[in-house]
Amino acid sequence: MAVVGSGAAGISVALTAAARGLRVLVVTKDLVGGATPLAQGGLAAALGPGDTTAAHAHDTLTAGAGLCEPDVVAALTASAPGAIEWLTTLGARLETRDLRLEGGHSAHRIVHSGDDATGAEVHRTLLAALLASGVEILDRTVALELLPADASRAERGFGTDDAGRAERGFGTDDAGRAERGFGTDDAGRAEPGAGSGAGDIDGAGTGTGARVRGGTAAANAGLPDAAAGEPVPVRPVPAGSAGGLAAARIGADGRLAPGVIAARAVVIAAGGLGQAFGTTSNPGGATGDGIAVAARAGAVIRDLEFVQFHPTVLWLPGASGQCPLITEALRGAGAVLRDCDGTPLMAGHDPRGDLAPRDVVAARMAEVIAAGDAGHVWLDATALGADVLEHGFPTVTAACRKHGIDPVTAMIPVAPGAHYSCGGIAADLDGRTSVPGLYAAGEAASTGAQGANRLASNSVTEAVIAGRRTGAAIADALSASGGPADVAGPAWPGRGMHDPRTRAAEAVNPGICPPRPVTGTAAADAGGPAIEGESADTGAQASEGAQAEAGARRRELALAMSRYAGVLRDADGLARLVRALTEAGGISWPAGTRSGRPDHDGPPPGTGRKPAAFLRDEARLGLDLEEVEEANLRTVSLLIAAGALRRAESRGCHRRRDAAGTAAAPWHTLARWDGQELVVTEEKL
């Protein structure tokens, strides 16, 4: 099986599956990076005196504003204490007695570490276990496309010949064996220094030393009882099954060297998409890659319009992209939000004050910021004193002081920033999606646990629980079946896409294909083969130009998303955004790649483009990481905008200026590409 992503969800999947005897390959852009190490607050679990899993579930359902699945939430909160125990068994240093309080919680139930470095400790622990487990790793590698299992002969241009054998130069020899340099030795085993192995992490983010096959004993300790919170089974869609991935190693210059990974199950655990917005707490690589790959493969995407904006991201003049996060636990300790006049911001607006759920606080902040010209409000932590700030919140204090702000004596300028995707690939808590053989876990998945607004510190908790359940479910499915890892049943998440009782489907824009990267040479000559016969210097120059163009488009998109699909939205702005994302020329096909699906065998109708050359030499492919990430951002941005336009109400972290009320009957928004048409429907709860 292949796992895309190396955060809490992805590693939990990999460890569990490896401990059950599966051969696992982890594909990741940055083994030691990602969003998990940046999580400051902690993990929510009912461990304190007088607290209960039922109370935790009640708070989660309240924050989720009617879109949580009660059975999923009950399973999540019941499994949370066990997830904490599993992490401590692996060696995580977690504070489980002096629990903290965060917004939306009715009790102190936030497990933390290093005061405000919980994510770093969780990731350190999981990564050490991964490197000791025998799991194979492809670091500095980006997933490109999901490959169908029913395609008996892989398409030329994806690194295979006409008989479906892997080509030399794409990481394999003529017999399809992995080449040295692609992270494995001649027998297909991971090489030391190539992203796998046990021991210390070197400067390249890989481990060295001996490996142990089959995972660690601790990795399989205390697996959740399958009977608890029984998930909704999956009904396969009529289309084919997942049979592997097209992926590419990332060169030092950003150029991509593609290859093919055959797998009986593929798990998407790379879900962050905060870089779609102008200001975010997410790292630079959070470009929605996993969701985009699944969407292009025809998977049902659910409720992606619900993007949670963390209320307190450090505001810096002229800053864009990733900005420092100011943990919510600071408000739990007594810090107060104030408007520019110094008046408490939440006074009289919500009985929970500064600890109201994030959607409530972020919306109030956005209203105040829009009414003024400062661009921010204040977070006043001066009453906490130097000892609490420097020893209880060292990460926040250091980040502020780095930018000339001393939180001991001065208020902190803050503004909402894109933080977490509450929607994603429709899946159950065991990771099963609408596409047989394709699984999703963590932020990439919409399991019904987060609803319309995630309760603080539930994300890492869900990632670990869903990751372990997904790994176990795949092991069970593969042991019982010789085909793709899936289980048939009467219903699956997102079933409304094929249910005649659902409201009539609405094509957002007929003829619109999923956004895909366009190479610099293909952009310069869209009329035919563009790269054959070029010199290496010409290709490099074209790539540099394409990278610059993709970077400029990415910045423009982020600004437009923040303006029209940010904390506060309206129909006019969203319609303008959808039009911009679907204009002719804005969606292009990659030179030399094809998805293997019949409805993707040509360019979008009406564009006048001829199919690009099928390129067998990765040095001539012309794609680079910037272009792939920009195409993925356009994919998820279109899905967000289309869902937000369809949802003419305000619910959770989706707020419409022109539709302030909340509908009495909640529904899920389901989106799926059907050939060259993006279909958006509603599924009543």
Image (spheres, rainbow, N blue to C red):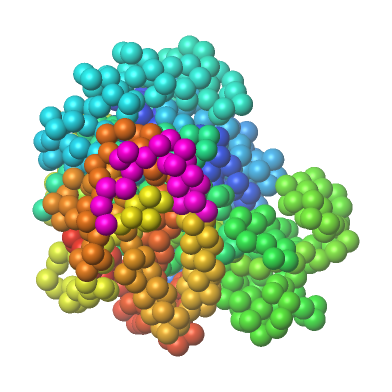
Residue 625 is situated, as x and y percent measured from the top left of the image, at: 45, 45
Quadrant location of the C terminus? Answer: bottom left
Q: What residue is at 21 percent from the left and 72 percent from the top?
A: 510
Above or below 265: residue 73: below
Residue in the foreground of this view, choosing between 622 and 16 = 622
Task: Indicate whether residue 561 is drawn in magenta.
Answer: no
Residue in the foreground of this view, choosing between 116 and 353 = 116
> Where is residue 123, by image quadrant?
top right
Q: What residue is at 62 percent from the left and 43 percent from the top?
A: 118
Quadrant location of the N terminus? Answer: top left
Whether residue 3 is visible to the viewer of this picture, yes or no, is: no
Above or below 388: residue 177: above
The answer to whether 224 appears left or right of 37 in the picture is left
Q: What residue is at 51 percent from the left and 13 percent from the top?
A: 209
Q: What residue is at 41 percent from the left and 51 percent from the top?
A: 520
Residue 657 is situated, as x and y percent measured from the top left of the image, at: 49, 85
Above or below 193: residue 404: below
The answer to whether 447 appears left or right of 381 in the picture is left
The answer to whether 435 appears left or right of 463 in the picture is left
Residue in the foreground of this view, choosing between 472 and 540 = 540
Task: Indicate whether residue 536 is drawn in magenta.
Answer: yes
Residue in the foreground of this view, choosing between 416 and 458 = 416
Whether residue 170 is visible to the viewer of this picture, yes or no, is: yes
Region in magenta: 527-548
Residue 673 is situated, as x and y percent measured from the top left of the image, at: 24, 61
Residue 582 is situated, as x and y percent measured from the top left of the image, at: 33, 70
